[in-house]
């Protein structure tokens, strides 16, 4: 079908996007690589010159480094787990007929529209604050000691806040996919005496696979760089309990103003992101081929 | 719905679905409620707060302290501008990849998505220096460019998956009739793709509206959008829950209302090709 | 002929232009969202009345965001701001780099000699005033007079840490959500480390010895932290590891705290309209351990002009307006003397009207008892009471702050915390070249 002519035209049409994205990738990347080998601290113009692998060495040997790798993975996996499982459950619920579907869907989708900064501020102050927050008021009402979420379970709290923002997204994609499920096939299976569970496992889940992959792919991209939620709620702490790679890079470049160290951290983050991406993409590639 | 459902079951589902919906929506609802109470009442227990007098005082104070109109205008310009610009660049590219796929098309798409994985904080200083030299600091133009680049991969991908669902025969028919490539895109393809484009536009306006790193770092006053507006109400001295609630409500209301009115459109295209 | 005409036209156009420019010099002022600065924004009518040719664009941000934006901009010479709000930590460092415009030629009515010496000293580099103080603060003890009375105790004017502990124990009643003492625990060099560093000075601890070797492995730091943990776990509020100035202020205003040791500027808030305990607050100097140093800090928020600004004259006009004596009188006439930005001018404390404000004397005494050039019991190579004025301190201080906040939250033990602090500080100082 594709003629020589249309192939050429296609190339020309893809060219602007590819070129722009290439520049957008390569220019900052080269600049970052360059800076990562320099002694460059914004606050100390005296400190200059080639740094060798010093910046990398200090970034990787930072006491928080391995914890940060772990926390990054925990946040990505934790949020994915909650949103995929929760999303399937909610999609199954919303797929059944009930009164007021339109309104409930509007209520459900709302968190996705909220700025991360705002949602972090709201959760931290109005809900999780151990003295004035809603949860503390409820605990006191029940005669319990208020639980201090951001100090006792900081990482889990961050995961919950982020999951709240992404649950609507997952639910909607899964719901749309569910609605395209062939109901005749379902009924046939029901006639054959297949129980709810086996229908779910053998018909629904395979049908949802593609949607689940899409949810995982899109969310992973955004979750790897979760920042505002941590910055607002815990500042990476207590200690380094919620310090992720992104946050550690922030600490280097905008708290220490160590551009060299921050750049080295940025490069390491890119490498780690690519490792994660490699696995995700392989998985996606398999599932999206059809 | 082919399946028959008893009214009892339907009632049960209704109760459950509403409970879950309200639970998920509750933090937003509570913020809005809190914004209509006095600072001293906002920190009281939930029932005491609801029974305290309602007031617009916090909105008045926020209005007086901040130039909401300017920030709102900037948010609109940046999110809409960047989405439109990205669309203009992305439509031909997505078209080409969908209808004239090569062996490398899939890799190309994945590579485009992977450009989104660069941690923004790591490249701030180089970008800041670049923006300074180009005179783009604190300009709407600069932010439109950045937001375009950030959202371009997602836009291309969404459009690609959408275009792929359009049957190729229609295009061939058009080609037989002697339609040029240009008119093929404008007169045949685009109308069919309108729903997909619409949801792409909506999703990207939302993403750009809520982007809080570059918008905060690269602006000061003239081009500062609502994300900066919020940053002046987070943890000031003294009681601030009511003022923060009011500012938050003002920052999210426009996008929330837009999202609600267009959610049907949005949902249709949010499938990323996951629905066959 | 044509040439002259053109020149004439050009000149008149230029005149018109400069006239227009005169009418519209826009300056961008970056400031923190603290109460006194917000109040200033509400008083801008007075400025516009006096200077109709200058328009001020405010960039009001939360402290951490502001500091980071302003630092990025000045260090890259971005030139986005004309007036910066910075503190006594930044001024000496930036002044030395040549990043600030000296404020030597402010009008005579500014009366530089009237500035409090302790505050002006911290803002002067090589004899030039680099920033004009907007408000100055130290720290002191604020306590609930009613609760002390009920406990049968009396707060000395110059308490020791043991007095504080005794009072905290007596005032704590957790069943009523009443905590004997509220202190900072939120990580940050300007949050928990400001308090802990000042506290450690009174315990005889120091950040570095004369060879820049970190001192967290010494007994004095162990004592400081152990005392702090004891106070906070037994008599402190829940969630203390996330409490900074603002959180504690809210707690105190609602009557949850028996005592609060924090910035002197808090005094006008705890006795102000949002406070439920406004008429029951007493003040005392920050505590000591009998080692010759008190646990109070010294800080000033000051207005400065970045070296890259194109509008230095308009910026100076603004700074003069915002920090001279007339401004204090303006605030007093509109909002009362208690709301005047404190801690910058001798004349304010000589004013009999201001002397009636309950916390005026204690603020001045606290400011005067802090000595940034000799902050510690043992000698140190740095200047600064609750910080060390070196560029690396923000990063180091924040990292140590994180560790101590984890110690307070109970996720790290005291010994491990001190060891981590020692190790990370040593690494950072080595990287920065202080330790060879």
Image (spheres, grey):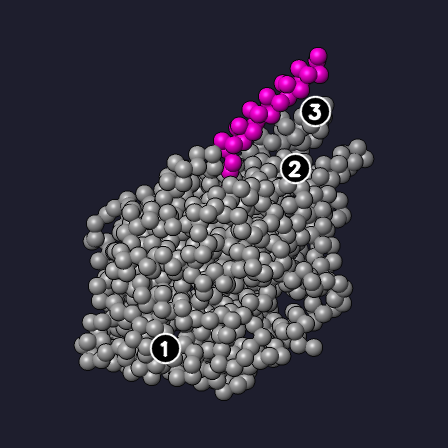
Q: Determine the residue located farthest toward the right in the rendered image.
A: A4
Q: In this picture, which residue range is highlighted in magenta?
A: C1-29
Residue C287, numbered circle: 1
What is the crowding at mark 3: few (fewer than 14 residues within 10 Å), some, or many (at least 20)?
A: some
What is the CA distance from the residue labelled 3 to the residue labelled 1?
Answer: 87 Å
Q: Are marks 2 and 1 in contact (CB under 8 Å)?
A: no
Most foreground residue, B264 or C150: C150
The x and y percentages for residue A23 are 72, 46
Q: Earlier in the sequence, mark 3 or mark 2?
A: 2
Q: Say which quadrant the N terminus of chain C sits in.
A: top right
Are callouts 2 and 1 both on one chain?
A: no
Q: Determine the residue located farthest toward the top in the rendered image.
A: C1
Residue B179, numbered circle: 3
What is the crowding at mark 1: few (fewer than 14 residues within 10 Å), some, or many (at least 20)?
A: many
Question: Can residue A265 be seen by looking at this rendering?
Answer: yes
**Looking at the image, is mark 3 or mark 1 nearer the viewer?**
1
Q: Is residue C9 magenta?
A: yes
Question: Can residue B237 be seen by looking at this rendering?
Answer: no
Residue B175, numbered circle: none
């Amino acid at each position: 079908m594709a003629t020589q002519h249309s192939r050429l035209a296609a190339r020309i049409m893809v060219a602007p996007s590819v070129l722009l994205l290439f520049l957008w990738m390569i220019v900052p990347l080269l600049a970052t690589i360059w800076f990562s080998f320099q002694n460059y601290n914004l606050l100390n113009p005296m400190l200059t010159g080639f740094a060798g692998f010093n910046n990398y060495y200090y970034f990787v040997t930072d006491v928080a480094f391995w914890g940060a790798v772990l926390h990054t993975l925990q946040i990505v996996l934790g949020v994915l787990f909650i949103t995929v499982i929760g999303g399937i459950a909610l999609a199954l619920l919303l797929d059944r007929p009930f009164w007021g579907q339109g309104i409930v869907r509007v209520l459900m989708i709302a968190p996705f529209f909220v700025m991360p900064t705002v949602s972090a501020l709201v959760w931290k102050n109005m809900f999780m604050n151990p003295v004035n927050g809603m949860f503390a008021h409820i605990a006191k009402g029940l005669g319990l000691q208020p639980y201090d979420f951001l100090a006792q379970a900081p990482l889990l709290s961050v995961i919950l806040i982020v999951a709240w923002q992404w649950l609507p997204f997952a639910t909607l994609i899964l719901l749309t996919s569910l609605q395209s499920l062939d109901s005749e096939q379902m009924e046939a299976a029901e006639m054959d005496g297949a129980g709810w569970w086996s229908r779910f496992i053998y018909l629904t889940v395979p049908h949802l696979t593609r949607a689940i992959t899409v949810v995982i792919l899109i969310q992973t991209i955004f979750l790897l760089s979760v920042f505002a939620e941590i910055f607002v709620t815990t500042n990476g702490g207590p200690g380094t309990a919620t310090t992720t790679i992104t946050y550690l890079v922030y600490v280097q470049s905008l708290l220490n103003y160590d551009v060299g160290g921050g750049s080295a951290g940025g490069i390491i983050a890119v490498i780690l992101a690519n490792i994660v991406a490699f696995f995700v993409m392989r998985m996606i590639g398999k599932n999206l081929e059809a | 719905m082919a399946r028959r459902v008893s009214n009892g079951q339907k009632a049960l589902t209704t109760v459950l679905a509403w409970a879950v919906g309200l639970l998920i929506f509750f933090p937003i609802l509570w913020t809005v409620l809190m914004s209509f109470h006095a600072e001293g009442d906002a920190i009281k227990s939930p029932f005491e707060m609801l029974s305290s007098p309602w007031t617009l005082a916090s909105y008045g104070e926020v209005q007086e302290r901040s130039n909401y109109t300017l920030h709102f205008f900037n948010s609109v310009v940046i999110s809409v501008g960047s989405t439109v610009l990205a669309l203009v660049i992305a439509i031909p590219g997505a078209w080409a990849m969908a209808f004239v796929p090569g062996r490398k098309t899939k890799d190309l798409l994945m590579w485009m998505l992977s450009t989104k994985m660069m941690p923004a904080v790591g490249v701030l200083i180089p970008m800041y220096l670049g923006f300074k030299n180009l005179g783009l600091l604190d300009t709407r133009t600069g932010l439109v460019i950045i937001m375009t680049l950030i959202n371009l991969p997602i836009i291309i991908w969404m459009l690609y998956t959408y275009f792929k669902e359009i049957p190729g025969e229609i295009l061939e028919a058009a080609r037989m009739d002697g339609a040029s490539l240009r008119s093929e895109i404008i007169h045949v393809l685009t109308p069919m793709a309108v729903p997909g484009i619409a949801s792409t536009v909506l999703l990207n306006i939302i993403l750009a509206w809520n982007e809080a790193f570059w918008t905060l770092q690269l602006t000061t006053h003239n081009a500062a959008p609502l994300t900066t507006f919020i940053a002046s109400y987070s943890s000031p001295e003294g009681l601030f829950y009511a003022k923060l609630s009011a500012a938050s409500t003002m920052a999210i209301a426009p996008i929330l209302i837009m999202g609600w009115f267009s959610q049907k459109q949005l949902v249709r295209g949010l499938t990323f090709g996951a629905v066959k | 002929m044509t040439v002259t005409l053109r020149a004439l036209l050009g000149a008149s156009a230029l005149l018109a232009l400069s006239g227009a420019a005169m009418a519209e010099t826009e300056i961008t002022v970056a400031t923190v969202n603290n109460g006194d600065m917000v109040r200033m924004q509400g008083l801008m009518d007075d400025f516009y009345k006096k200077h109709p040719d200058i328009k001020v664009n405010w960039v009001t941000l939360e402290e951490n965001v502001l500091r980071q934006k302003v630092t990025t901009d000045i260090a890259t010479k971005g030139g986005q701001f004309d007036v910066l709000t910075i503190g006594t930590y930044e001024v000496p460092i930036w002044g030395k780099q040549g990043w600030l415009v000296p404020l030597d030629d402010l009008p005579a009515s500014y009366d530089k000699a009237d500035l409090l010496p302790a505050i002006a000293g911290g803002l002067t580099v090589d004899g030039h005033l680099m920033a004009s103080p907007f408000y100055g603060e130290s720290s002191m003890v604020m306590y609930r007079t009613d609760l002390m009375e009920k406990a049968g105790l009396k707060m000395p004017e110059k308490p020791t840490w043991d007095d504080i502990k005794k009072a905290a124990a007596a005032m704590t009643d957790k069943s009523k959500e009443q905590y004997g003492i509220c202190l900072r625990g939120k990580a940050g060099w300007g949050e928990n480390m400001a308090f802990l560093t000042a506290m450690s000075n009174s315990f005889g601890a120091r950040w570095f010895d004369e060879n820049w070797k970190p001192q967290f492995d010494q007994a004095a730091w162990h004592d400081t932290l152990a005392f702090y943990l004891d106070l906070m776990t037994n008599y402190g509020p829940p969630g203390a590891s996330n409490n900074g100035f603002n959180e504690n202020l809210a707690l105190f205003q609602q009557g949850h705290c028996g005592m609060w040791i924090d910035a002197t500027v808090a005094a006008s808030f705890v006795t102000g309209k949002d406070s439920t305990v406004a008429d029951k607050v007493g003040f005392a100097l920050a505590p000591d351990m009998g080692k010759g140093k008190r646990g109070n800090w010294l800080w000033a928020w000051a207005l400065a002009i970045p070296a890259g600004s194109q509008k230095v004259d308009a910026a100076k006009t603004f700074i003069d307006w915002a920090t001279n004596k007339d401004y204090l009188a303006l605030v007093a006439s509109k909002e009362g003397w208690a709301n005047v930005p404190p801690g910058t001018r001798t004349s304010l404390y000589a004013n009999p009207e201001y002397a009636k404000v309950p916390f005026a004397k204690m603020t001045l005494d606290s400011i005067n008892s802090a000595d940034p050039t000799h902050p510690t019991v043992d000698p140190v190579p740095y200047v600064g009471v609750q910080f060390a004025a070196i560029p690396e301190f923000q990063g180091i201080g924040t990292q140590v702050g994180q560790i101590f906040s984890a110690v307070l939250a109970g996720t790290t033990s005291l010994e491990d915390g001190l060891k981590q602090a020692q190790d990370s500080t040593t690494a950072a100082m080595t990287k920065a070249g202080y330790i060879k």
